[in-house]
């Protein structure tokens, strides 16, 4: 992980790579930087003018000045009055552009702790890259210096480092191929790291799944050589007034089962576990920050494979709450394992349950690649929307229309596991709603936003994004 440190001034003798904010109004350039060296500022502005540097938001240009040899300067467009997310995104853009250098000094003007935090977040998120299996890759940024005179910089950097490391860990886990990350490996990692952070852990596997009647996990994981697991992690501080349960979908690879995915839909299915990775890292972050709120994370881990022991379409399973489900599509497996986690979570009577899942392709059709759909109990749903807004993550509240339940009727069981193709994101939410009882609840469908198949932008890399951790953390802080 990239080390982040604060420095009091811009040291030209030590810094080899310097990032500055720039804007342009009409034909006039302006620097947004913490440095006041008039010679340096004049030269940068003159070169920006001569080279007609692109000063639009997030654009990054690279220049070298005659009077400051050996220093590479990255100019990143900020706009006239940058908001917090502009600072976050531009800091990410410049650390992405500076990969291949061991260090970078960011000297972008800021006036408040919130602005410094946004710059630090963006810098560390933008510095991330997945290189595990590359025999050659650009040298990672090992250190980023942020020039600031704010007194609370050490605390801000410490907190930001914990939060961004969690996001980057979600990215790392989600990018990991299925032959290197299965339910057993992910469960071991979650238990080891949670225990080290002072959390309680329990793994339901083997006979436990039968004893506890965790029917969805057993059905979905039946075709894999690696058995399914339900992992429970608990952060319980000495003093708390609220208990929030988090449930995450952890399908470490999804073939679709006997409802086999087509070849162009089966790639990237290593990413189907990032809901579990998200709730795992959210709980871990709450523990590391010592939040005064009890958090329980339920990781529903399985591998959806095809074999002689795999579940079939038309199979009927019965959950521990007595509800029977006819499986009319084995590729709608996420909701089957999530139901187990939701039932177990609801039995503990938390104040609210939040579930996170790469659940439906319908989410992408409805909301695109960058916007998470959130549905559930109106009050909880709106709290999630407010938390997401405050950290600049895109979510959109969605309804759960009662009439769509008609499309999920089964002739031989209480419900089918899929309903109408129209409104597929909503019928998935309606299915999950059947397993939370009276507990206030929200469901986050992150199918599109969790994995960026297009080019990198701002602090978001190509590949796994780590979306929604910052939202969930803000929600927990709001509840605490």
Image (spheres, rainbow, N blue to C red):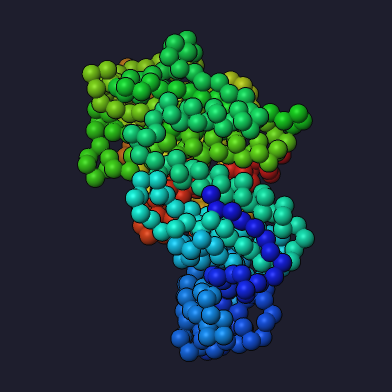
The residue closer to the viewer here, 120 or 404, is: 120
Residue placed at 41% from the left, 59% from the top?
138
- Residue at 56% over, 77% down: 22
**Residue 7 locus on image (x, y percent):** 68, 64
Examine the rendering and report whether any part of residue 197 can be seen: yes
Q: Does residue 223 lie above or below 125 as drawn?
A: above
Nearer the observer, 290 or 401: 290
Q: Nearer the viewer, residue 103 or 245?
A: 103
Where 418 sits versus 413, above or below?
Answer: below
Task: Judge by depth and name the residue closer to the eye, 92 or 366.
Answer: 92
Where is residue 153 shown, x and y percent of the image? 72, 58
Q: Position of residue 357 (x, y in %)?
A: 45, 38
Q: Is residue 50 above or below residue 392?
A: below
Residue at image point 51% right, 47% down: 168
Left or right of residue 415: residue 310 = left
Q: Is residue 36 left or right of residue 269?
A: right
Q: Count the marks: how many?
A: 0
Question: Is residue 386 among what the camera can see?
Answer: no
Q: In the rendered view, does 322 fall on the left or right side of 258?
A: right
Residue 384: percent from left, percent from top: 59, 45
Q: Quadrant of the C terminus?
A: top right
Q: Is residue 362 above or below residue 107?
A: above
Residue 462 appears in which quarter of the rendering?
bottom left
Residue in the image at 42% along x and 25% along y? 184
């Amino acid at each position: 992980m990239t080390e982040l440190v604060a420095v009091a001034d811009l040291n030209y003798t030590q810094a080899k790579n310097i990032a500055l904010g720039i804007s342009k109004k009409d034909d006039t350039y302006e620097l947004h930087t913490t440095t006041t060296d008039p010679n340096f500022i004049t030269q940068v502005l003159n070169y920006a003018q001569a080279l007609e540097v692109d000063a639009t938001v997030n654009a990054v240009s690279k220049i070298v000045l005659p009077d400051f040899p050996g220093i590479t300067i990255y100019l990143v467009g900020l706009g006239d009055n940058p908001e917090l997310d502009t600072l976050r995104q531009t800091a990410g853009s410049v650390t992405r552009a500076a990969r291949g250098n061991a260090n970078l000094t960011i000297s972008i003007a800021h006036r408040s702790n919130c602005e410094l935090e946004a710059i630090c977040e963006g810098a560390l998120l933008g510095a991330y890259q997945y290189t595990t299996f590359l025999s050659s890759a650009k040298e990672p940024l090992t250190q980023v210096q942020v020039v600031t005179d704010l007194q609370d910089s050490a605390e801000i950097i410490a907190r930001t480092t914990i939060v961004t490391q969690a996001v980057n860990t979600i990215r790392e886990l989600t990018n990991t191929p299925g032959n290197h990350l299965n339910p057993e490996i992910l469960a071991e990692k979650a238990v080891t790291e949670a225990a080290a952070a002072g959390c309680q852990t329990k793994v339901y596997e083997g006979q436990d799944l039968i004893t506890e009647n965790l029917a969805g996990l057993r059905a979905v994981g039946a075709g894999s050589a690696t058995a399914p697991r339900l992992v429970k992690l608990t952060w319980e501080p000495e003093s708390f007034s609220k208990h929030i349960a988090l449930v995450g979908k952890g399908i470490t690879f999804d073939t679709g089962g006997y409802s086999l995915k087509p070849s162009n839909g089966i790639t990237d299915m290593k990413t189907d576990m990032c809901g579990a990775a998200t709730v795992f890292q959210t709980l871990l972050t709450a523990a590391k920050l010592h939040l005064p709120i009890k958090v329980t994370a339920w990781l529903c881990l399985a591998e959806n494979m095809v074999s002689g022991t795999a579940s079939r379409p038309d199979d009927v399973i019965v959950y521990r709450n007595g509800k029977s489900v006819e499986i009319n599509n084995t590729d709608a497996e996420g909701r089957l394992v999530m139901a187990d986690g939701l039932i177990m979570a609801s039995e503990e009577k938390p104040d609210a349950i939040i579930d996170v899942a790469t659940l439906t392709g319908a989410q992408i059709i409805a909301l695109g690649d960058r916007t998470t759909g959130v549905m559930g109990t109106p009050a909880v749903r709106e709290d999630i929307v407010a938390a997401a807004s405050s950290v600049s993550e895109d979510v959109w509240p969605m309804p759960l229309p009662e009439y769509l339940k008609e499309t999920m009727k089964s002739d031989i069981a209480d419900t089918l596991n899929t309903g109408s193709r129209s409104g597929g994101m909503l019928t998935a939410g309606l299915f999950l709603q059947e397993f939370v009882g009276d507990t206030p609840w929200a469901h986050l469908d992150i199918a599109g936003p969790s994995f960026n198949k297009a080019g990198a932008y701002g602090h978001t890399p190509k590949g796994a994004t780590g979306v929604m951790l910052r939202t969930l953390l803000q929600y927990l802080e709001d509840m605490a």
